[in-house]
Image: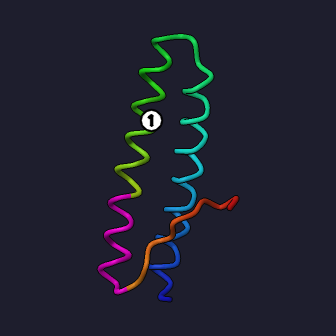
Amino acid sequence: MTNSAAALNELIEIARDGQTFYTDALRKMRNPNLKVVFRGLIDAKSQLITALSEHVRMRGLTPSHRGTLG
């Protein structure tokens, strides 16, 4: 794996960790205003993962499908 693809996959994994964190927090959140904020953060992480994954694919490799913890 190229260094750039490895770095991109690390960023994907970190973004997945954040996505998981905010998804779990959203489920437990009672404040409707914070729910909106968390939903926005989840969506932003999803867009970041999609964009980074495309860059990994452009290098002919497979994007990571896990986070750093799993």
Q: What SS does tag 1 mark?
A: helix
Q: Residue at x 56, y 61 (%)?
A: 13
Furthest residue to the front?
27
Q: Residue at x 54, y 27 (%)?
A: 26
- In the rendered picture of this protein, how many numbered marks are placed on residues? 1
Predominant SS along the magenta part: helix
Q: How is the image coloured?
A: rainbow
Residue indicated by mark 1: 41
Question: Is 9 left, or right, of 57 in this rendering?
Answer: right
Looking at this view, is 39 or 48 the one in front?
39
Q: Residues within 10 Å of mark 1 (few under 14, many from 20)?
A: some
* The C terminus - image quarter: bottom right
Residue 57: x %, y % from top left = 34, 78
Looking at this view, is 65 or 4 the one in front?
65
Residue 22: x %, y % from top left = 55, 35
Toward which corner of the image does residue 50 lie, by quadrant?
A: bottom left
Q: Residue at x 54, y 10 (%)?
A: 31
Q: From the viewer's perspective, is residue 42 above or below residue 46? A: above
Residue 51: x %, y % from top left = 32, 60
* Magenta-span inclusion, residue 19: no
Residue 36: x %, y % from top left = 42, 21
Chain part drawn in magenta? 50-60
Looking at this view, is 55 or 28 the one in front?
28
Q: What amino acid is found at the position of numbered circle 1 in the picture?
A: Leu
